[in-house]
Image: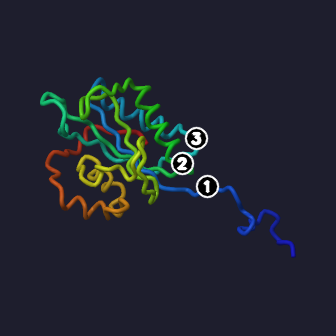
Amino acid sequence: MTSPNPYAIDADTLSGMKPIRQVVFALGSNLGDPLSNLQGAVSSLRDTPDVIVVDVSSVYETDAVGGPEDNPPFLNAVVLAETTLDETTLLERAQAIEDAYGRVRTEKWGPRTLDVDLVVVGNTVLERPDLTLPHPQAHKRAFVLVPWAEIEPAGEIAGHGNISDLLEQLDTSGVRRRDDLSLED
């Protein structure tokens, strides 16, 4: 029997379709022009084929975690997006954006022009030498969870739980919303 709608999709015959998954990127910068660097990352993610930016958090200023004592404060934000891209492609894109903004990896937790961390990709859990999902420290980082909770309070980190619940266990005093700064989404 033929469908009366010639554009109807027969779900039983679909193949090769990729699921749309939510992805969360955490952005940080404390060298050069941090606000401009964050804006460049948001714009670059928006320009990525098969990535739809859904929301961008406010800008937060945060004390540096680890690294040298003279490490300046960071500006941070979180980007919520939807994508059909796989984890490896998303990681490569995040690293390409960092490279475009002069990211140099010389010192763990050191100052940087731009950090684009892949926090979660749907409910994917994986551990490879080049990528661990969810991000292995995200559930402990107020500078990730505070901006994320602003735009998605019901967000989840697989294996760790709801971000709002996780935030209740963290000291958030070092995370300050900067209402005088904003990113165009």
Tell me how far mark 2 sits from mark 3, CA to CA: 12 Å
Callout 3, which amino acid? Pro
> Residue 155 vs residue 85: left or right?
left
Q: Quadrant of the C terminus?
A: top left
* Dot 1 alpha-carbon crowd within 10 angstroms: few under 14, some 14 to 19, many 20 or more: few
Q: Quarter-wise, where is residue 117 in the image?
A: top left
- Reading the image, the residue beneath label 2 is 86
| Residue 10 located left or right of residue 31 | right
**Disc 3 and disc 1: Cα gap in Å?**
14 Å
Q: In the image, residue 121 lies at what x, y percent?
A: 45, 53
Q: Which of marks 3 and 1 is nearer the N terminus?
A: 1
Q: Residue 150 at what x, y percent from top left?
A: 31, 54
Q: Toward which corner of the image does residue 177 lie, by quadrant?
A: top left
Give the residue type at disc 2: Asp
Q: What element carries label 2?
A: loop
* Picture quadrant of residue 124: bottom left
Residue found at x 30% / y 33%: 29
Tell which circle, 1 or 2, labels the residue nearer the N-terminal end: 1
Q: Which mark is residue 18?
A: 1
Q: Which residue is drawn at 26% across and 33% down?
A: 108
Location of residue 141 with respect to 154 vertically, above or below: above
Residue closest to the far front = 129
Find the residue positioned furthest to the right.
Answer: 1
Mark 2 or 3: in front is: 2
Residue under label 3: 49
Q: Which residue is drawn at 18% across and 56% down?
A: 170
48 left or right of 113 in image: right
